[in-house]
Amino acid sequence: MREALDRKDLQTVLRIYVKATGLTQEAVGFLINTQQANVSRIWRGVRKRYSIEDLESFRDGLGIPGRLLGLQPGPHEEAAGTSRDGGGDLEEARAERSDEIYGGDGRLVGLARTALEAGTPGPPIAGDDNESVKRRTLLGGLVATAATAGSLARDAEPLREAFEAAVAADASDRDADTWERLAYDYAHEVGQSPATVLQPELAADFTELTNLLSSAQGTAKTRLVHVAAQMAALIAINLTNLGEGRSARRWWRTAARAADQTGDHTAAARIRGRAAVISLYTQTPRLSVLEAAEEAIELGRGAPESVVSGHAAKAQALAELGRHVEAKDALDDLRGVFERLPEAVLTERSCWGWSAGRLHFVTSLVHTTGGNVEAAMGAQDAALGASSEQSWKFRGQIEMHRAGALFVTGDIDEGARHMRRVLENLPAEKRNDGLLQGSAMTSLRLAAPAEAERPSIRQVRELLAATGDR
């Protein structure tokens, strides 16, 4: 958080605040005096530049100490150091208005008072550096408010559900518009936002969508079933990120069944292809992955955006099975499909996009497992060059490939050291990611069996076991 504040990274600040408080984007928009659509753009990273007014709205609305954003103290800080007759009354007045709008029954007033009390640090503790003080100042306020705000959000949910039931009407195309936007947003969040935060949100929204489907007819129903297919697939991906591969398999079945019901062979093939790719990071037998990939390719009827993931899964499954000549042929097929992808698919940054970085990724895996180290490292360099520093998971997986290439050359200790350095430089919650751990285990299998008890290999396995279930 401190680094995010120093960088004026309001996207990260917003995500941490929402996670800590449990408030919706709409509620945060009210607090910072902006439209929910603007909050959504910040949340998704669409907005990259911010004005002084933007920073001030975050300072004042979320109760962030101004100095952490390079600003003067806000009204909430001045109020915290003066009598309750001063600026504190202004904050309480805003909280009372929030209570009235959101049905908080006085609890947002309590939240405001808590935030005011936590908004300025106590006297420095001996030995604390500036970073510790900043972190304690900000996180102390967030932790102090989390229980109250989270409870408020949960308590309001039954009221919303009761209202939805009371005014129930047949689902319309307008409902489908809303849910398509929601699925679009989730497709940009899965793999980027913490999986533990997303899972209950995805589950709650899928439940609501399921209830809505019972009243849908005609084109509205077809569109909503299409959304359900996407949502089920996103839940499956998120579960895999959490290391829950077995649960993910059930959701992939649901996603495929829903896609089939729409009659859209493009969606059916794309979901099956993505399922095959993601199953490479679970304990699914590689022959099963290969069969699923070939099924996706057949269903896609040659449409590039339909079959690209199927071809990617096929090349990687063959490589892991040790069928390297076939894997290279499959990689050539993938390149041919990639060259025909529409520009919209190449530039899409959600779970459904297929950028050049993904092609480099598959190329890296195929050449690494095949022992073609020079080509593997060239693909790894290209993949890292095509990704941003914020793409920690993708870059981490590529670094696992690099360790695998070192294992293939026989440089076991250096490969293990490289893997360990990369993993130790990540926070525990990121190190625990299912896809990252899957890539690590794939590379570890490239070390000769006789090296399994080598101290450097054991240390890496212990590090992975300490943060994951594999």
Image (spheres, rainbow, N blue to C red):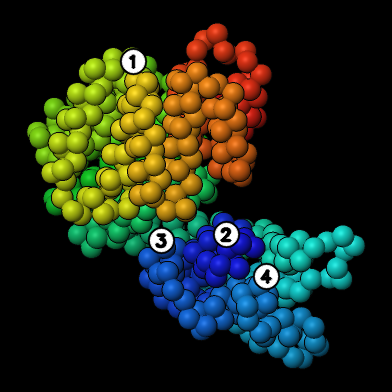
Query: Is 65 above or below relative to 433?
Result: below
Which is nearer the eye, 251 or 132? 132
User: Quadrant location of residue 143?
Assistant: bottom right
User: Between marks 2 and 1, how big is the CA–CA gap?
Assistant: 41 Å
Q: Which residue is mark 4?
A: 111
Which is nearer the eye, 247 or 214? 247
Comparing labels 2 and 1, the label whose residue is closer to the camera: 1
Residue that extends furthest to the left in the rendered view of this protein: 301
Query: Is 336 above or below relative to 146?
Result: above
Question: Could one spot residue 383 in this view of the protein?
Answer: yes
- Name the N-terminal-most of marks 4 and 3: 3
Q: Which residue is mark 1?
A: 321
Tag 3 near tag 1, CB within 8 Å: no
Classify mark 3: residues with Cα within 10 Å, few (<14), some (14-19) or many (20+): some
Position of residue 313 in the picture relative to residue 98 (left or right): left
* Residue 298 x %, y %: 13, 27
Question: Could one spot residue 136 in this view of the protein?
Answer: no
User: Between marks 1 and 4, how big is the CA–CA gap?
Assistant: 57 Å
- Name the N-terminal-most of marks 2 and 1: 2
Position of residue 159 in the picture relative to residue 298 (left or right): right
Report the amino acid beneath label 2: Ile
User: Quadrant location of residue 145?
Assistant: bottom right
Secondary structure type for disc 3: helix
* Residue 419 x %, y %: 55, 32
Report the amino acid beneath label 1: Leu
Tag 2 near tag 1, CB within 8 Å: no
Q: Which residue is mark 2?
A: 16
Q: Which mark is residue 44?
A: 3
Residue that extends furthest to the bottom in the rendered view of this protein: 85
Q: Which mark is residue 364?
A: none
- Name the N-terminal-most of marks 4 and 2: 2
